[in-house]
Amino acid sequence: MLPLKDLRHTMESCNHCGQCKWVLGPKTKGYDYAEICPIHQRFGFDAYSGQGLLNIAEEILDGELEYESGLVDLIYSCTTCGACDINCKSVRDMEVLETILALRARVVADGWGPMPAHQEAAGAVAAHHNIYGRAHEQRFDWLAPEVKLTKNCTTAYFAGCSAAYRYPQIAQDTAKILNAGGLEFTVLHAEEYCCGGPLWRTGQIAEARKVAEHNLAVLEKQGIDRVITSCAECFGAFRDFYPRLGPVNFRVMHITEVVQQLIAEQRLTLHHREDRKVTYHDPCLLGRLSEPYVPWNGEIQAFGRHEPPKQWRRGAQGVYDAPREVLQAIPGVEIVEMVRNEENSYCCGGGGGVAEAFPDFSQWTARERCREAGSTGAAAMVSCCPFCQSALEQALGAADGGMKYLDITRLIAEALG
Amino acid sequence: MSLPKQIYAELEQIVGAEYISDREYILAGLRHAMPSSPVKPLSPAAVLLPGTAEEVQQIVRVCNRHGLKFIPTVSSLIGFAYPTALNTIILQLKRMNRIVEINRTDRYAVIEPGVRHGQLRTELMKAGLSYPVAAVGPGGSVLVNFACSSGDNHNQHGASRTNRYILGVEWVLPSGEMVRLGSLANDAGWFCADGPGPSLRGLVKGYAGPFGGFGVITRIAIGLDEWRGPAELPTEGRSPDYKLRLSPDRHKVFIFKFPTLDRLRDAMIEIGKAEIGQAVLKYFNATAALLATQSANDFWELWESGLFQRELSRPLYVYLATHSAEETAYEEAVLREIVAETGGEEVDPAIRAIYENNMDFFILVGFLQRVLRLGGAWAPAKLSADSVHHMFEIGKAIPEFLEEFAAKRLIVDAPDNFQIISMEYGHLAHIELLFLWDRSMPAWGEIPMQVMARSHETEIRHGHHGSMPPRSMPMLGTLGPLYSNCHIWSEKIREAFGTGR
Ligand SMILES: Cc1cc2nc3c(=O)[nH]c(=O)nc-3n(C[C@H](O)[C@H](O)[C@H](O)COP(=O)(O)OP(=O)(O)OC[C@H]3O[C@@H](n4cnc5c(N)ncnc54)[C@H](O)[C@@H]3O)c2cc1C
Ligand code: SF4
Ligand code: SF4
């Protein structure tokens, strides 16, 4: 984990160009839906943005800014969606999200963070290995007797806290799909702990590391070489957080990538037809933030030269095509795109600990995303992240506009007939 | 530094509690040092986000009553947007972001300051309309470009600088009084900045714009041009590898290289006489390399290959945007004839392909901020407009003062990193020279001032008109007397109107 002081080049390089607040020029489609940073769109002050958080981080680093509760609130109102990061990286050699995460870790180290709701989640993970504080024994309650697991298999389905406790249908559908495709897999049963992502993103590094190291050891011990997730948060943690802790000896695949492969190999046929127009919401952690972490230890020399050369993660290699191709393979499904899609996707408001700490702002963000979804004329909004589901379903419910939220695994499972 | 409670309360009363702050952590977002400057700007005393022109008027009056200074801003992209004195408040006009009207018949749009290029340009495309977009990125304010800063742009050969496009203006004076210019003054609409009401267009904008020195522009109407492309940008690919190709029947890009600047100049003049082309420019070569690459390391690899120095030290970029395939064929034929007569030849096809595959260079210039990628900064040592001929004379003299800095490795060795853009079919042209330096150099903060000083000396020696005189106080002192004492005039205007800064 890079400490804040190692990100000074990023902080000093910012020229307030504002790219981190706007959809990239060539992807803009008009007046509406041109903003990309939820906190900036909602609160307006520059301090509420990737750029502002860099400025704040620099002043904290230099001891020029005193902590106060409003400052901590601001830092934790960022959804860590990373839109600022990839937009900045389209024009600059900077690590905006890395700095935001390092800032949170620093706030925790200085005793000012995280927010009480995040501390509660960490306490729950310590006691029960899940962020909700539910009994660990119930973690695999979703596992129906008809699910076919394969013993000593090197592929594991990692359900994650959210699918395990809040949205068991996602886990059940995932298992059904894998069985239908004849893909052998196992689960970790009582050895599956929270992926640690929500703790890492709220600056609780030691707590996150503890569960992640547990999961890594279990996966290693069981000889797992492929982990399948149905949760973007877990996917993001495996791709971005785990490699920071040490070597990761397994491949991580999202269920949509698996289904894409099964369809291509003609092992899975989606034949049940249901005509519907849907719009697909790219979860940040499955899309722009899902590129594997690549460590870089080097020197930034005069005129921006990175020695040795650095491999930049700009969000281009996120999982964008798989969910779209899978949806297209479902008879009767028509996809209509939102303006802010793929690497320019607008956050659902559910990530970065915001839903727990600032539910009103989280819902404001979710409503903005639902407004955009509504403008496409789609009847349903499809995505593949239980955190997005929680935020978006709530906003759609409050709006009462008739649009439904569907996890992609539900559509696939239905199409299996 | 926060505001006295009573003043804060007065301002809060105007905008509402949500839209004012003097908390240090909010002000931090507006007080960091720019990479181009060693100096951290002074902290504003507060930042406000007014929502209407009436609120702006009331804020200005409170400022005047209490001796506060104020600076209107939108993106706060440039140094002029930051306080230079204590007791300054920042009015960020982002919430005033309405497109008030798009008039297709009379081809104008009425906008507030918070409307950005990315928004307006793409919204107008749906109506088959356009305007010359400054190369600043999608987040730059359109109103600021048109009314408050220079507004030079890649397409000004077939269009113009933005000062020519300003129509009606709504303006809150430093006194708090509201002035409406041109036809707007008589409630006759937004179509004209000169009469039947008063025209103060020259004061509002002049050549360079007042950069917030004369109150706050709250609305303007801008004239619009025809857009000859599709209603929506046909962008493919993912960041930062976008492809944006327009129909080759109506949109074509050419890049030629010339043996001398004189030949290049002659070609530019002839193209203007023939009245063909949308964009005709000699573009920067180091900047082009920065725009064409995705990281500083990529840039250095390209730059050290020598390709852009070899092919683009005297390039002529031409973008044709026409109504039909026949018109394109005609313009291309004329262009090729002129280039052949003036001794130009096509550059390496790989370079032309960059622009053919991504025509955003002529639309929104979305990747412009890459110019700052080298971790240091850039500054314009030249920035002015005059005849095409004169601009090229200035260009020819650049190595006289720049090479010494490059030889000492204080700046990137790029003496050809200047652009000359033809304007209004070659009736005028604009020049801009960018030099790039790095913050890790010892005493790097002094490099820009030294380069500027040597640039001025060269101008005075040659009788060149290559800089905007009002850009800095030392420049005003030396160049003002040579420009009809403009420094005295600008001071008189400042006295007459007062200033919020
Ligand atoms: C990399 C880079 C490239 C640029 N390229 C170009 C270019 O090609 N062409 C060009 O014209 N400019 C260019 N600029 C200059 C400038 O940034 C742009 O003109 C920009 O659009 C200004 O918009 P903004 O929202 O950032 O304004 P700000 O930075 O917020 O303000 C700019 C100035 O205008 C004043 N101002 C802002 N709003 C108002 C108002 N409503 N009333 C009165 N004064 C106001 C401010 O006080 C400030 O002095 C460039 C700048 C950078 C950093
Ligand atoms: S895009 Fe990057 S450089 Fe530009 S303002 Fe945002 S953080 Fe700063
Ligand atoms: S991570 Fe998202 S919410 Fe946070 S500053 Fe960046 S764009 Fe805004």
Image (cartoon, rainbow, N blue to C red):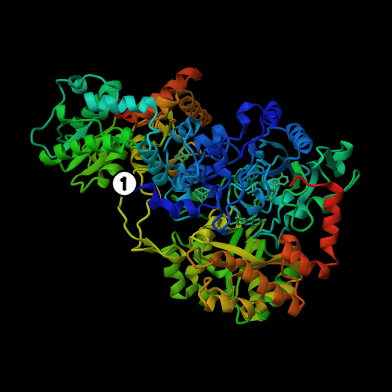
Judge the density around disc 1: few (<14), some (14-19), many (≥20) Cα neighbours within 10 Å: few
Relative image position of residue B104 (x, y in whole percent): 73, 42
Asked whether A152 or B257 is in front, the reply is: A152
> At 60% from the left edge and 59% from the top edge, which residue is drawn?
B251
Taking the image as shown, residue A305 lies to the left or right of residue A162, namely right
> At 50% from the left edge and 44% from the top edge, which residue is drawn?
A64
Q: Is residue A272 visible?
A: no
Taking the image as shown, residue A166 lies to the left or right of residue B431, namely left
Relative image position of residue B188 (x, y in whole percent): 87, 38
Quarter of the C terminus of chain A within the rendering:
top left
Relative image position of residue A140 (x, y in whole percent): 19, 23
Asked whether B54 or B362 is in front, the reply is: B54
Q: How many marks?
A: 1
- Label 1 sits on a secondary structure element that is loop
> At 35% from the left edge and 57% from the top edge, which residue is drawn?
A311
Asked whether B268 or B12 is in front, the reply is: B12
Residue identifier under label 1: A1
Does ligand 3 reach within 8 Å of label 1's beta carbon? no
Taking the image as shown, residue B432 lies to the left or right of residue A345, namely right
Q: Could you tell me which chain the residue with mark 1 belongs to?
A: A
Q: Please identify the residue farthest to the left as the structure is shown.
A: A152
Q: Is residue B183 visible?
A: yes
Amino acid residing under circle 1: Met
Taking the image as shown, residue B489 lies to the left or right of residue A274, namely right
Asked if B63 appears above or below B403 in the picture, the reply is above
Relative image position of residue B165 (x, y in whole percent): 76, 51
Asked if A107 appears above or below B246 in the picture, the reply is above
Quadrant of the image occupied by residue B16: top right
Asked if A87 appears above or below A327 in the picture, the reply is below
> At 47% from the left edge and 25% from the top edge, which residue is drawn?
A363
